[in-house]
Image: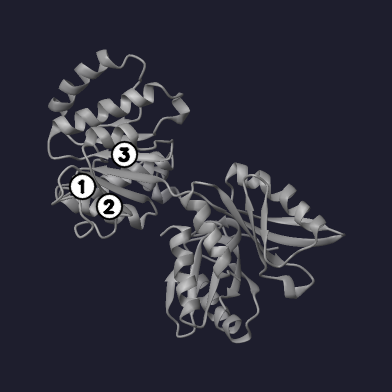
């Protein structure tokens, strides 16, 4: 899926007045699953489109996205994957990423 | 937040092969501007719906134009009237073009996976029954034309990836000849980086024996024949994966070998806990 295809999904969700947010990795440090620019859509019913790397990091971002959808105000969230080897789902990565989350409406 | 008009303009830029960046303000003290978006074009013009002050727009151009030229997506800090403004600068690159010549069994999964990988996919065949969108629902474009006419006119750049998978080797060869003729007129960096041609080793040796006399100014380094990485592919889908893996390897300038080869011995690995700030 290229960027235009991604935003096409965002626009069609907007047209259907779906409640959703877009999360984008805007900065990374160390070893992280995806690079700056990776994006996903989070819908208010919990459905997602795209991925910013999966695992608990993505789980945290999904949680924060619900708050963004609720309040209608963008925010940043920092995902820290530098903790130990056994950080919940295995902690295969060891970096930090900043994620910008914005409502689509 | 992305508006209808912003999206329309970005799509237009990409379709017209015009690089653009989308700038999103991701942090500044005045929170009502967080999320504001601006498009910057290669010629230095802006599309700004939030009507920022002119001297701020100027700052944006100065800071973001170099990133557009380098095609680099990045978050930067813009200082404007002693205020730090964090801007996420996202490149909207023109998608790479994958041309699949021949609409046979292998071409179907190639077009589908190619699309999933973000390529703009064109399928071409000279037979109407094969070159149709029903057979290739995922292709961006299905062309019915003679191979020679198509390859004589199709735009080629260093972002064009070409696969010659036609039903007969002679069609692959005429297509290749047409491409090589055009490439010989281009500087090496303007040529395509990947032309894959299916075929057995024996057939290929026959082809190149002929081509090397015909094209003395072409080093053939962008030709991949037989196509694909050696993963033992047999079925059309397996072959498609092997071919696209090879294209990714070339596009991303990677080795194509197993990542585990970077590790010499598992038993000698040591895990180091990162110290936290």
Marks 1 and 3: CB-CB under 8 Å?
A: no
Q: Secondary structure at mark 3?
A: strand
Residue B152 visible in the displayed image: yes
Coordinates of residue B92 in the picture (x, y in percent): 53, 53
Judge the density around disc 3: few (<14), some (14-19), many (≥20) Cα neighbours within 10 Å: many
Have a look at marks 2 and 1 and say if they share a chain: yes
The CA span between labels 2 and 1 is 12 Å
Q: Earlier in the sequence, mark 3 or mark 2?
A: 2
**Residue at mark 3:** B162
2 and 1 marks in contact (CB < 8 Å): no
Q: Are marks 3 and 2 on the same chain?
A: yes
Name the chain under label 1.
B
Q: Report which residue position mark 1 lands on.
A: B239
Farthest-out residue, right? B82
Front residue of A11 and A48 = A11
Percent x, y for residue B84? 80, 61
> Which one is in front, A67 or B132?
B132
Q: Viewer-proximal residue, A105 or A91?
A: A105
| Labels 2, 1: front one | 2
Position of residue A6 measured from the top left corner of the image (x, y, whole percent)? 46, 64
Q: Which chain contains the residue that carries disc 3?
A: B
């Amino acid at each position: 899926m290229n960027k235009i295809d991604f935003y096409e999904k965002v626009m069609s969700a907007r047209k259907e007045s779906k409640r959703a947010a877009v999360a984008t990795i805007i900065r990374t440090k160390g070893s992280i699953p995806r690079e700056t620019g990776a994006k996903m859509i989070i819908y208010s019913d919990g459905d997602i489109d795209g991925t910013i790397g999966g695992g608990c990091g993505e789980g945290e971002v999904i949680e924060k996205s619900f708050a963004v959808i609720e309040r209608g105000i963008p925010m940043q969230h920092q995902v820290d994957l530098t903790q130990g080897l056994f950080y919940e789902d295995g902690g295969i990565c060891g970096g930090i990423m900043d994620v910008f989350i914005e409502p689509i409406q | 937040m992305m508006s209808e008009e912003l999206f329309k303009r970005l799509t237009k830029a990409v379709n017209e092969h015009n690089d653009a960046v989308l700038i999103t303000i991701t942090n500044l003290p005045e929170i009502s501007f967080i999320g504001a978006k601006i498009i910057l074009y290669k010629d230095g013009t802006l599309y700004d719906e939030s009507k920022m002050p002119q001297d701020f727009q100027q700052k944006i151009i100065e800071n973001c134009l170099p990133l557009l030229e380098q095609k680099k997506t990045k978050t930067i800090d813009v200082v404007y009237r002693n205020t730090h403004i964090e801007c996420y600068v996202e490149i909207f690159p023109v998608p790479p073009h994958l041309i699949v010549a021949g609409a046979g069994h292998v071409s179907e999964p190639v077009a589908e996976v190619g699309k999933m990988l973000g390529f703009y996919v064109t399928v071409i065949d000279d037979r109407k029954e094969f070159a149709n969108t029903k057979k290739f629902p995922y292709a961006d474009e299905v062309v019915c034309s003679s191979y020679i006419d198509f390859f004589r006119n199709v735009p080629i750049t260093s972002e064009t990836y070409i696969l010659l998978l036609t039903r007969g080797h002679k069609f692959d060869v005429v297509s290749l000849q047409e491409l090589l003729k055009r490439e010989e007129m281009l500087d090496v960096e303007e040529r395509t980086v990947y032309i894959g041609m299916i075929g057995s080793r024996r057939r290929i040796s026959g082809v190149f024996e002929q081509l090397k006399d015909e094209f003395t100014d072409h080093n053939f380094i962008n030709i991949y024949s037989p196509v694909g990485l050696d993963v033992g592919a047999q079925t059309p889908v397996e072959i498609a994966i092997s071919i696209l893996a090879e294209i990714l390897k070339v596009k991303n300038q990677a080795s194509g070998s197993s990542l585990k080869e970077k590790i010499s011995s598992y038993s000698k690995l040591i895990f180091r806990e990162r110290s936290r700030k």
